[in-house]
Amino acid sequence: MKHYPMQMANRELSAEEALEILESGEYAVVSTVDEDGTPYGVPLSYVMIDGRMLIHTGKRPGHKIDDFARDPRVSVAVATEVEPCYEETFFTTRFASVVAQGTIERVEDPVLVRRALVELCMKYMPSEKAEIGGAIQRELDITDIWAISFQEIRGKGARRKPKDQR
């Protein structure tokens, strides 16, 4: 993997800040490459567990699952704190983002699969906590969890509000 220097290096975030963005992000665009070299990106819900990004899919073959199986390399993009703004004489955007490269694999550990499903439900629908166990039981046979292990994580941000105002 070729490493490019970041343009506008003054916007590069620390490794710790980049991980915080992954932890707090709402959705990620996970990109693969088709058999014929065409890029394919899809927005997905996710959770971070032990430094890895976990996503869920159905078990049936499809575009992204076929790509994952054929070539496990992925690129991930997450943007947070996005806020268009006008400053003095120009339009701009406040933001924090991460672009990361890694590999993806299907999770086979049933304990981690259940943990990921619980954490996904709690992240996106905490008001339905009482329903999580039943939903997992009903859907477990048709659901897969995939884990992305990152080889490179780079964060970038501009015009971010102070931490206590985010």
Image: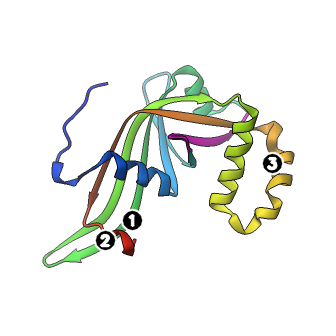
Tag 3: amino acid: Ile
- Quarter of the picture containing the N terminus is top left
Where residue 88 appears, as percent x and y from the top left, is 14, 79
Q: Residue at x 56, y 20 (%)?
A: 70
Magenta residues span 49-59
Disc 2 from disc 1: Cα separation: 9 Å
Q: Is residue 117 visible?
A: yes
* Crowdedness near tag 1: few (<14), some (14–19) or many (≥20) residues, C-alpha within 10 Å: some
Q: Residue at x 31, y 71 (%)?
A: 162
Residue of label 2: 161
Q: Residue at x 25, y 30 (%)?
A: 3
Q: Secondary structure at mark 1?
A: strand
Where residue 89 appears, as percent x and y from the top left, is 13, 76
Disc 2 from disc 3: Cα separation: 38 Å
- Would residue 145 be counted in the magenta stretch? no
Residue 81 is marked as 1
Where residue 62 appears, as percent x and y from the top left, is 65, 33
In the rendered image of this protein, does residue 139 appear above or below residue 146?
below
- Quarter of the picture containing the C terminus is bottom left
Q: Which one is in front, 163 or 153?
A: 163
Tag 2: amino acid: Lys
* Crowdedness near tag 3: few (<14), some (14–19) or many (≥20) residues, C-alpha within 10 Å: some
Q: Are marks 2 and 1 in contact (CB under 8 Å)?
A: yes
Residue of label 3: 136
Residue 125 is marked as none
